[in-house]
Amino acid sequence: MSALRPLLAAAGLGLGIATVREPGPRPAGPAEAAAAASMPARRRLEFLAGRRAARRALRAVGLDCGEIPRSGRLPVFPPGRAASISHSAGIAVAVARAAGPGLPLGCDLELRPLPRAAARLVLRADEEGLLVDRDEPFHAGSRPTGAGWTVTELFSAKEAAWKALAGPGHALGPACLGEAGEGPQGLRPARPTGSLRDLRVGPAEDGLCVVRLRADPARAVRVRVVRVGTGVFGYVLGPSPGLGPSAALI
């Protein structure tokens, strides 16, 4: 994951990484402590790792941040601070942006590949042509331009885009996962408030993809998905051409 820092920095994003195995994890303040106290042990470690990753991502773009409370399952940042957090297999990552608070922001880490059978929970019929015919070996750090996409890659692209498109005031509820979810274990059918199948993904130049809200196609973001070991990391680069700045769900 650390090797991705220059790639994200080129896009104006800071990357923060933390693990549940770091010694002595402590809440950064009373709000984090109160939230963590009600969680099972494993979830508490993931929660605190996510907060550390977010603070590290913000420091990477020159911003300091104290404790990060939450509203429901979503982190609440002080004014002028924003980051997107994702967890998988005991690792927490976050991305942050220093300028343009109205720009979309989202990321997703999936270190456990999804089976091909999970496609029905992620894609609609008009997207299935994007899939590779079979699972192919991953090459960490990049993906073949013009090649088909795996279910895991498309899931990660949509999950990152969901966080960016479902900002305050928009009629999108949580996607298949919460802030701390993991793909293979947490993937589940659509909720009444919406699902990743309410987004449509399509290929773009340079191995990127564009993810649009089906109910409002003008709302779209560009997403890059890179391979990390046997998993993937997806992150939003910005709005798709023709889309004005929108608030980010973080």
Image (cartoon, rainbow, N blue to C red):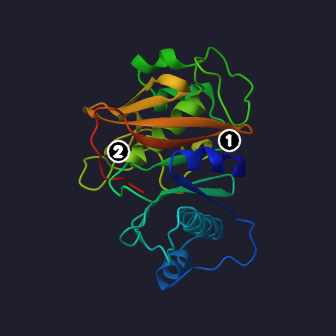
Position of 115 with respect to 241 (left or right) is right
Local secondary structure at mark 2: helix
Q: Earlier in the sequence, mark 1 or mark 2?
A: 1
Mark seen at residue 165: 2
Please tell me in which quadrant of the rendered image residue 175 appears. Answer: top left
Give the x, y percent position of residue 247: 31, 53
Mark seen at residue 239: none
Residue designated by label 1: 112
Please determine whether, in this image, residue 207 is positioned above or below residue 113.
Answer: above
Please determine whether, in this image, residue 62 is positioned above or below residue 99.
Answer: below
Give the x, y percent position of residue 135: 68, 22
Is the C-beta separation of discs 1 and 2 under 8 Å? Answer: no
Q: Nearer the viewer, residue 91 or 194?
A: 91
What's the residue at 44%, 74% (across, down)? 69
Local secondary structure at mark 1: loop
Which residue type does callout 1 highlight? Answer: Arg
Which residue type does callout 2 highlight? Answer: Leu
Give the x, y percent position of residue 58: 53, 65
Could you classify mark 2 by the number of other residues whose Cα lies within 10 Å: few (under 14), some (14-19), or many (20 or more)?
many
